Image (spheres, grey):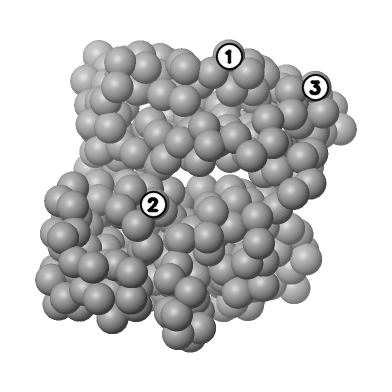
Amino acid sequence: MQNSIWIYILLMSGATYAVRVLPLTLLRKPIRNRFFRSFLFYVPYATLAVMTFPAILHAARSPVAGGAALVLGIVSAWFGAGLFPVALICCASVFLLELFL
Amino acid sequence: MKNSKEDKTTYSGWDRRAVFRQGLRDGIPVALGYFAVAFSLGITARNAGLGPFQGFLISLLNNASAGEYAGITAIREQVHYAEIVLVTLIANARYLLMSCALSQRFHPDMPFFHRFFIGFDVTDELFGLAIARPGFVEPGYFYGTMTLTILGWSTGTLGGVLAGNALPERIVSSLSVALFGMFLAIIIPPARKNRILAGIVGLGFLSSFVCSLLPVLSSWSEGSRTVLLTVLLSSLAAFFFPVPDDDPQKEKADESHAE
């Protein structure tokens, strides 16, 4: 049996809202537990890195172009390009490489 | 960003319209970036079998790039309902931290109901804008930043689902990596300044790659692997490299990755 996309959307949205609104409404004091604070601090980097690679290789039609997008994205972000420019550079590198691949 | 000249010592000591307009204006570049990235998310959603309205709705209600990407991937893999909740919680866990930080920045006299509306849209970028406000964060400012950015994000996703069908495959292929570009723009600059973060990013890439090849783990859903590796890497880092107590730099680090 297929699970319903609507229920998925509902569950996702509820979970996302809870993550944001619970600290705003319940935790009005700063978190004191050092391990938990550190854990929360590191989570975004771990999760975004894990989601980016190797998934970016399969996102484009050609894995080589996806890999090039990864490298150029890292380099441009390293030199301080913002959200939009980095996204644009990744897209452009895939587009140009796939002309030849 | 302009400094507000109003008296912020009393809750009503600022011009609400001016503050809202300021938020609206600060939101414009963010909204443009969101539109482009959401477009790529819409293509992912279309590939996972979502319709245009479903894509629009998912972005309207979630306002989360990584969380939505993880959730949409989970939908594609038809995971158990409990799993999508877990995956979404982990992919969005950073908002827990941001909301904690943001909750410290409201005026004590701010009516409580505002927290329910602001809690709808704590994103990396809007958190960054809000936290950069001098003094207290005015709810009106936050609502100003929300207005165009939610519009850009949700209509961008809608556009991605719709036009993903119409656009040439070459264009779709190149737009598909925009989301990952945004992830890189979030994690790389702080990793450049902090060796521990750089280590986490590098290990994240490596472990995720290895897990996608290992016999048992590769049969797991992408979301489950993300949860497992995130918890593992972050726990290890928190255990071996705890962030200092009451470190004002910590919030600064959050800001810098929030663009």
Residue name at image x 77 percent, y 40 percent: A34
Residue type at mark 2? Ile
Q: CA distance from mark 1 to mark 3?
A: 13 Å
Q: Are marks 2 and 3 on the same chain?
A: yes
For label 2, the SS is: helix
Residue type at mark 3? Phe
Which is nearer the eye, B108 or B223? B108
Horizontal side, residue B92 vs residue B193: left or right: right
Which is nearer the eye, B56 or B109? B109
Residue type at mark 1? Arg
Q: Which residue is mark 1?
A: B195
Position in image of residue B246 (x %, y %):
64, 39
Q: CA distance from mark 2 to mark 3?
A: 29 Å
Q: Which mark is residue B131?
A: 2
Which is nearer the eye, A17 or B82? A17
Nearer the observer: mark 2 or 3; the answer is: 2
For label 3, the SS is: helix
Q: CA distance from mark 1 to mark 2?
A: 25 Å
Is A60 placed above or below B16 here?
A: above
Q: In the picture, which quadrant includes the C terminus of chain B?
A: top left
Q: Which mark is residue B240?
A: 3
